[in-house]
Each structure stands twice: as structure tokens, then as C-alpha cells.
Image (spheres, grey):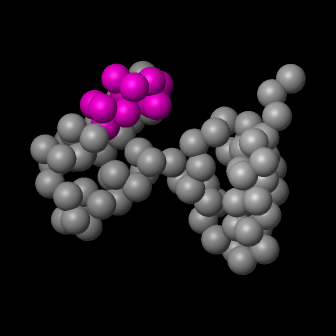
Amino acid sequence: MNLVWPLSIEAIFLAYKEKLTLLIEEREGRNSAKKMGIKRAGIGAVIIKAFKENIISKDDAVLKLNTLKEKHRLDKNSYSTLMLQISN
């Protein structure tokens, strides 16, 4: 059985209480937040948002996503989906 990390529990509680989008990567924590109706975002979504708002360049976005993939922070499907958003 996988448990939600203690710091994730605190973040989930705060996001729920304050009606905030939760920035979380941990799978169990994301699932718990989803069940509670909390909007969630991962680091990949933050990179895409920064790119679309011209905060970072396309090259920087690609580099950051490649780094996350290489460090096993993004699975293949998530990586492909995010890369498509940069290409469009």
C-alpha cells in the first residue's frame, strides 16, 4: 500500500481550505487531491504555462522537459503530451 507523504497531506489540506490549485508530483497525493475535487498541476504544466506566457523560450521549455524525462520525473505519455503543446 502506498501512502501520501506527510508534507503532501499538509499541502492538500491547504489547497482544499483555500481553494487553490495544488502543485504536486506524488501520485498518491495527486489521486487523493483529485478525489477531494482539488485542481492539480505538475511541474510539466508549469513549464508549459511559462512557455505560453513567454516567460521562458521554446528551447528552455524543451530542455526542462527533457531533463525531467531523463531524471524519470515524467513518463513517456506525459512527456509526449507536453512536447505536443510546445510544438503547436
Would residue 33 be seen by someone viewing this image from the given angle?
A: no
Residue in the picture at 81% in, 56% down: 36
Query: What range of the chain is rendered magenta?
Result: 65-75
Q: Is residue 53 left or right of residue 82?
A: left
Given the current orientation, which residue lies at the most extreme bottom position? 18
Residue in the picture at 68% in, 45% down: 30
Q: Quadrant of residue 84?
A: top left
Q: Quadrant of the N terminus?
A: top right
Rendered position, 32 above or below 46:
above
Rendered position, 25 above or below 2:
below
Residue in the picture at 59% in, 49% down: 24
Q: How many marks?
A: 0
Q: Quadrant of residue 40?
A: bottom right
Would residue 30 be seen by someone viewing this image from the given angle?
A: yes
73 in the magenta segment: yes
Instruction: Pinpoint residue 88: horizontal percent, then vertical percent.
Output: 22, 46
Given the current orientation, which residue lies at the most extreme front position? 6
Q: Is 4 in front, or is 30?
A: 4
Given the current orientation, which residue lies at the most extreme right position? 1
Residue in the picture at 82% in, 34% down: 3
Q: Is residue 51 left or right of residue 26?
A: left
46 in the magenta segment: no
Instruction: Pinpoint residue 32: horizontal percent, then vertical percent.
Output: 78, 46
